Amino acid sequence: MDLSYIDKSVRHLKEEKKTKSKLKKILGFRPKKLSLYQISFIHKSATYINHKGDTINNERLEFLGDAILDSVISDYLFRKYPKFDEGKLTQTRSKLVNTKQLSFYNKLIGVNDFLETHTKTELNKKHLYADALEALIGAIYLDRGYKKTYSFIEKKIIKPTNLENLINTETNHKSRLIEKSQKENFTIEFLTELFDEEKNIFVAKILINNSETSKGFGKTKKDAEQEASYNAMKILNPNYNNGEKNNKSNN
């Protein structure tokens, strides 16, 4: 693959040898094309233009990594749960790769320690971390191929997750919030709009009794409203435990 478009003078996170050593600890292997990984950690807000006039940030790698991640998760779940229908497989995959989960994996792996960002917007950092993890996956794929990428995702994302608990976790926080409002007789209103047109990120605001209570961000209106609903539920009930079905008494 032609990687000539990558500027050899791309900024270093630290001296090359030390960077490779640190990356090896989180990847489980030593990277071959270090510049790919360095680019994967450059958020759009930290974009720079190289001497050729090329724009350098992690958006293209994020696009690739998102597709690879979906492919690997789909393959893994298809093999592990032969009795799941298409709807159940899709729902489980969505729980594994939503922004909140990816942000958690990112911190667990340590990718956020490398992230370079100059953003001053109110965009939730979970999205920056999730995007960086997807970009890293794209870098691994280009550097070491599909098999090595599959292994990384399996070891670093799938295996640390209690899949049975995740499958049995309720993620429809919006429905839970609506049920709570009806039960406790308070009004709720959702105000959802496009927050970042270029990244196609939405922001949802929830007004409870006409007072803004929470916000949420997502790559779809539904995701933004679900995150805002979760945040509202946590404000209304600090014991709200990720919406688990067996914790209905908390609501």
Image: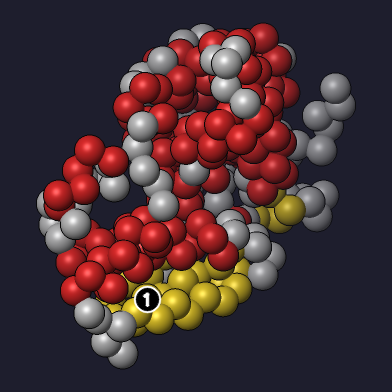
x%, y% of residue 197?
Answer: 66, 70
**Left or right position of 19 against 213:** right
- Which secondary structure, mark 1? strand
Residue 138 visible in image: no
Q: Residue at x 55, y 51 (%)?
A: 43
**Label 1 belongs to which residue?**
206
* Residue 178 occupies quadrant: bottom left
Tag 1: amino acid: Ile
The answer to which quarter of the image holds residue 49 is bottom right
Q: Position of residue 114 (x, y in %)?
A: 43, 38
**Relative image position of residue 204 (x, y in whole percent):** 46, 71
Measuring 34% from the left and 79% from the top, which residue is drawn there?
Answer: 188
Left or right: 65 in relation to 15: right
Q: Nearer the viewer, residue 250 or 99?
A: 250
Query: Which residue sits at x=47%, y=46%?
Result: 99
Q: Is residue 207 above or below residue 94?
A: below
